[in-house]
Amino acid sequence: MVMVDKAKPVEPHVFLRGNPGRPGKQVPRRFLRVISATERPAFKEGSGRLELARSIASKDNPLTSRVIVNRVWFNHFGQGIVRTPSDFGARGEPPTHPELLDWLASTFVEGGWSLKSLHRMIMSTDAYQRRSDSSPEVLRKDPQNLWLSHQNRRRLDFETMRDGLLATAGRLDPAVGGKSVPIETEPFTTRRTLYGYIERQNLDPIYRTFDFPNPDSTSPRRTNTIVPQQALFLLNSPFVAEQSRHLAARPEIAAGSAEERVRKLYHLLFGRDPEPHELALGVRFASHNAAAEDSPASPWHYGAGTVIDKPGHVHVNDFQAFPRWTGKAWQVSEKLPAPGSNFANLTAGGGHPGPSPKWMTIIRWVAPANMAVTLTGTLEHPNKGGDGVRARLVSGRSSLLGTWDAHNKKVETTVAKIDVRRGEILDLVIDCKAEESFDSYSWAPAFKVVGALPDGLRTASWNARTDFHGPEPKALTPWESYAQALMLTNEFYYVD
């Protein structure tokens, strides 16, 4: 999409009281009076957009160069010389160093508006290269550090943080240009976060978690929040775990003694040697089998199979886990219908059985302890067509525990008490009866402990909807866990 000027632009008028239906006097297209010299010639070339751009970027315009210089300074120091980067007017804050701002702006213009030269000049100064440490006396006299006695400690923004994780893992793609790419879908892209896809009406939650500004409006600066979701992302994100694995697998990290590996990790992540106590802590951490203490695997499994129904004994045969995870559903292949299984799939709230008898959908729950549980849930078949669906609860030890039929209605699926042993399988089976058509269903059964919670058990209930999950991530090795632990430190996320 491009903008094309009309051959004869419309002459603008003042709108009386802002009403376009009441045009006032005609006004020529020209530059703003408040930042112009006495003469403001009218724009003559087409719509005047090119002349407007030249006026904005003119060396005679005192504002543009100061705004640019102030924003570059802001990015390097965390605060601008003018603390209100989008307001240089009477309502904005005055510059803390007006002469410095004027000198930087004039030098910037004389240098051909070169941002690279401006960055180099600022970063070569003594003020920029100071440490962020300060004395109590300095903090008492200048708590906001207006006089730059020390550097401001700053947290990395989201883009720099993500790029930093990729860079230390040795995976950052430095390519310049090209289309934007999703950054939160697997396989994770290694492109710089600058190229992350932004959908203004449906912004990815990860951006909001890390204070990405609203893309529907201009934003002179970002807010800085510290919320639990940020730490939870860094602890649990598959993306961060993936970078931890790659970092621990780098050739310079994977080889050598434990002490050498700790030193190399510190060099890559922090650019320094570890202190003696840090070295000892790292060796002890990595030597401990952290992966063995991970939380137990989910008791839920998703697949299909056949129910063998014999007098006095019902059991599930040939259970096969669904191989394909779409991000929302478990099924046989990426697209449905799939050969053989047709529309067989399982989602958080239900699914669709395949052709009987081989493709009955099965949610398998494996008891994590010896205990008594109750089953609750509502089976809904919303369609008038077809002949409905049948749900069954089948125990691997004690056969059929419940059966329910639903056709264009809701049915409560309840079993008051089930005694289970650790490792016992309870299969929640749905089949399509005689006809497969119109057999989408909703069913999110839940198990709950009856009585006291068994020793060592952390939860008293399991819900098929809220516990629904995709492939479980592989546990990190001790060295991978240690690499991730270092990636979570303030030293990695703050410019000191």
Image (spheres, rainbow, N blue to C red):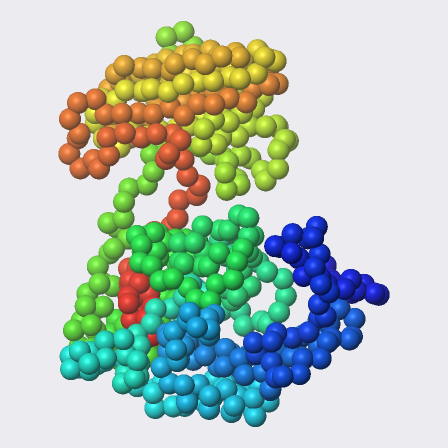
Q: Indicate left or right for 192 with 26 as reference.
A: left
Given residues 304 and 199, the one toward you in this image is 199
Q: Residue at x 30, y 52 (%)?
A: 228
Q: Is residue 425 above or below residue 138?
A: above
Q: Indicate left or right for 419 with 223 as reference.
A: left
Kindly indicate the quadrant of the structure image that contains residue 481: bottom left
Kindly indicate the quadrant of the structure image that contains residue 112: bottom right
Given residues 35 and 298, the one toward you in this image is 35
Q: For residue 316, say whether it is visible.
A: no
Farthest residue in the right direction?
7
- How many numbered discs sit on the rendered protein? 0
Q: Indicate left or right for 452 with 26 as reference.
A: left
Residue 162, x across and y down, in percent: 43, 64
Farthest residue in the top direction?
311
Q: For residue 36, say whether it is visible.
A: yes
Figure quadrant of the N terminus = bottom right
Q: Is residue 195 above or below residue 98?
A: above
Q: Residue at x 48, y 63 (%)?
A: 219
Given residues 445 and 22, the one toward you in this image is 22
Residue 71, x across and y down, in percent: 46, 76
Q: Indicate left or right for 461 with 249 as reference.
A: left
Q: Residue at x 34, y 68 (%)?
A: 155
Q: Is residue 378 above or below residue 232?
A: above
Residue 354, x across and y down, in percent: 56, 24
Kindly indicate the quadrant of the structure image that contains residue 416: top left
Residue 289, x across and y down, in percent: 24, 56
Q: Is residue 207 above or below residue 465?
A: below
Q: Residue at x 62, y 37 (%)?
A: 335
Figure quadrant of the C terminus = bottom left
